[in-house]
Amino acid sequence: MKITVIGSGYVGLVTACCFAEIGNDVICVDHDQRKIDALRQGKPTVYEEFLPELLTRHGGARLNFSWDLVESVRSADIIFVAVGTPQSADGQADLSYVEAVAHQIAPALGNGFKLIVNKSTVPVYTAERVRRTLLLSGAKPETFDVASNPEFFREGTAVTGFLYPDRIVIGADADRSVALLREVYQPLTTGAYRETATAIPPPQNALAKIRLIATTTKSAELIKHSANAFLAMKVSFINAVSNVCDAVGADVEEVCEGMGSDARIGKRFLKPGIGYGGSCFPKDIIAYRAVAIENGYHFNLLTEIMRTNEEQRLRFIAKIRRTLWNLKGKRLGVLGLAFKGGTDDIRESPAIYIIQALLREGCIISVFDPAAMKNARECDFGSQLKFAEGAYEAAQGCDALLILTDWEEFACLDLVRLRGELKHPIIFDGRNLYSPEEVAKAGITYVSVGRPDVSPEGLPVASL
Ligand code: UDX
């Protein structure tokens, strides 16, 4: 199949590389010439496992990059639109890029039937609006159809998420479009791809059989927003439970184990911490709430999910204040900048939020992150923050160490060595990466989320 992917951002690039990997001829289009130049040289423009391999494997052969949208659309059977849908001032998704692309596609239609598919996360009715825009721009109705095919992969595991998804959702109102999309995804749904000799290895929990769910375009658009909102709700729910645990002296990890073992609930996305972030959850929930209101329904639960998420960061800062007393002038080592482990993405990162709040309080910060330092260097943190070369260096001479991102390497630090680096042996763990007993045994006071604070024998209890 000849596929054109419009947009070489996170979703677009991974989508283009993976469609090439499963046997299609793909052109990935972007108006940013620097990006196209880099990609043509095989240099990934986002940090993601397996992306460099796929670019090397298919770049210049089945996978090409171009800034000529019209020509790329002309040569395609299916056009996936994966341009940004940022948040506008009123919370709604800003769909002006989607609209602009529709206007640009229209003149390139006419040589045979083409399917235009929204891959970006978009509110309900977008497929309909794209259809109308194309017609307005002069496209003939028999030359195209518009479908929705939301993407569910996660940063850090995007390539394997694309190739081994839990399900594939295609929203299309015409049988012909459903058939085309079924054909594109066949190597994944039949399991043929994973049998190929060079297949990217499946993750541990990959399903043997991948279901393709065909719906209307409106349902597909709602599936994407609802799935993200539900996952964020799980995170906010367990964070709210962790606050009750803090209040009564219970252990939220035990509560999670007990709750999550109910197959109807499940343990995934029940990890308490300092709240969710990233480029999707915060933006999508606001957009979902806005679209519900626009259609006459006040989805108040979504407001509460967001409120709980914001409060969670403030509660963590309050714990630091309660333990360290005055924050002004305190030296803090910080582990983590990314919104979660395994990515260099700092968008809406709770770690960044907490760091900025502590800097405003007069703290002096030394921070380390295995992947996100380059992005963070572009933020203006002022002179009271310096970047360290590693976790132990970040802790050197500090009044306390904060763990803000759940990187695997932060979960297996030499605690005795850390104690030696710190001026005062205190860890605030916003991701519950350690067992409290283990940390206390190493001679460190440990304050985590939804679990009682612990202090080594002879030291005063953590919080007042
Ligand atoms: C999310 C959705 O999972 C994905 O399906 C969608 O396509 C894009 O948005 P992503 O933003 O990559 O993916 O991150 P995800 O792994 O889902 O985590 C989101 C946030 O929730 C992170 O900040 C993470 O730290 C937090 N989180 C997640 C928790 O705090 N606890 C959990 O148990 C799970």
Image (tube, helix red, strand yellow):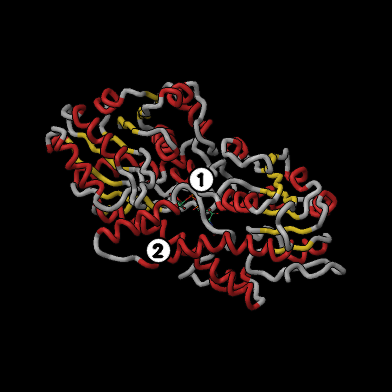
- Residue farthest along the right direction in this orientation: 458
Tell me residue 63's x, y (percent): 40, 27
Q: Could you tell me the amino acid type at mark 1?
A: Arg
Residue 93, given in percent of the width and then of the height, sits at: 34, 48
For image coordinates 30% across by 56% down, the residue present is: 291
Report the front residue among 399 and 85: 399
Question: Residue 84 is drawn in which quadrant?
Answer: top left
Residue 18 figure quarter: top left
- Looking at marks 2 and 1 on the same chain, the residue that comes earlier in the sequence is marked by 2
Q: What is the secondary structure assignment of the residue under circle 2? A: helix
**Depth check: 344 or 162 in front?**
344
Q: Quadrant of the C terminus?
A: bottom right
Q: What is the spatial separation of the Cα atoms under label 2 and label 1, in whole angstroms?
A: 20 Å
Left-right relation of 64 to 291: right
**Residue 22 visible in this rendered orientation of the protein:** no
Residue position marked by numbered label 1 in the rendering: 347
Residue type for callout 2:
Leu
Left or right, residue 121 beside residue 253? left
Residue under pointer 2: 302
Image location of residue 111, percent across then percent down? 17, 27
Q: SS of the residue at dot 1?
A: loop
Choose between 442 and 220: the one closer to the eye: 442
Most extreme residue toward the bottom, as rendered?
248
Horizontal arrangement in the rendering, residue 255 relative to residue 160 (left or right):
right
Q: Is residue 134 visible?
A: yes
